[in-house]
Image (cartoon, rainbow, N blue to C red):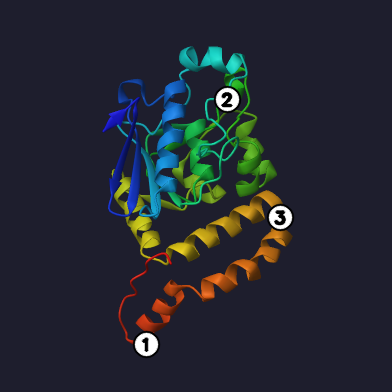
Amino acid sequence: MSDRDIEYEKRSSIGLIGFDRPEKRNAFTVEMFERLAEVCTEADDDDDVRAIVVYGKGTDTTTGLDLMNVGPSFRAGKVPIPAELVDPWHVVGRLRKTPMVTAVHGRCFTLGTEIALCSDICVAAEGTVFGLKEVRVGIMPAGGGTFRFVQTAGYSNAMRYVLTGDEFDAAEGFRLGVVQEVVAPGAHLTRAVELAERIAAQAPLAVRAALANAQVSLLEGWKKAIADIVPVQVPLINSEDAVEAAMAMMQKRPPSFKGK
């Protein structure tokens, strides 16, 4: 069901989130920011959802901000994502516990590039065009385009595009580490769902712990991530899922994980 131009569908253990304002090239309104945070939180709080896929409907992932709509709120310094909700860009709200795969195509500008950077895996269709164009309209990237792009691609590689507002294609995105797989036009969503299903098939507690440890390493440094390993690993080793994995290996069958 579509609601405020963001669609959410739960398909088995996958939560599919679609930008659904194709007549405006999925340009984001304040309401879309709010709705995206709401459905990301709904998916993240659902133990049956083991991976999230984000994509755009129509010809483009998103062309960025609908400046006529968001301008007044942004000028007033209002943040469209409440602190108690999951922030898809990991800037102001809750951190996501559930792995996210982005499927991008067409134009994937500004906040689209930034959500790709914030996702755990990005699949891009050939022909996808990225761009952090904020400096062209008198603002700066505010969803991770400065710090997360630098972290992913290296300082000067990121600044090459942040400071010019120039576009780059899927091949360049792959070179920079923004994109993990480039697929044929139209195959991006199918491939993203396949990867999400692969994630969902693994032990849920272990997947969430691995994601959380990786996030700690990025936000607080590798020393903190190392310090967290033993306190997190011991309960995992003693979990029902770890026992099930060992039994499945001995019995030469696929494991059946319960998240316990």
| N-term mark: 3 or 2 | 2
Real-space CA distance between mark 3 and mark 2, rounded to the nearest whole angstrom? 27 Å
- Residue 253 place in picture, x, y as percent: 30, 80
- Residue 250 place in picture, x, y as percent: 37, 87
Give the amino acid at mark 1. Met
Give the amino acid at mark 2. Val
Which numbered circle lies on residue 79?
A: 2
Q: Label 3: state its secondary structure.
A: loop
Q: Is residue 29 visible?
A: no
Q: Which residue does the image show at 53% across and 50% down from the upper left?
A: 175
Q: Label 2: state its secondary structure.
A: loop
- Residue 233 place in picture, x, y as percent: 58, 70
Indicate the quadrant containing the C terminus: top left, top right, bottom left or bottom right: bottom left
Which numbered circle lies on residue 250?
A: 1
Real-space CA distance between mark 1 and mark 3, rounded to the nearest whole angstrom? 38 Å
Residue on which disc 3 sits: 221
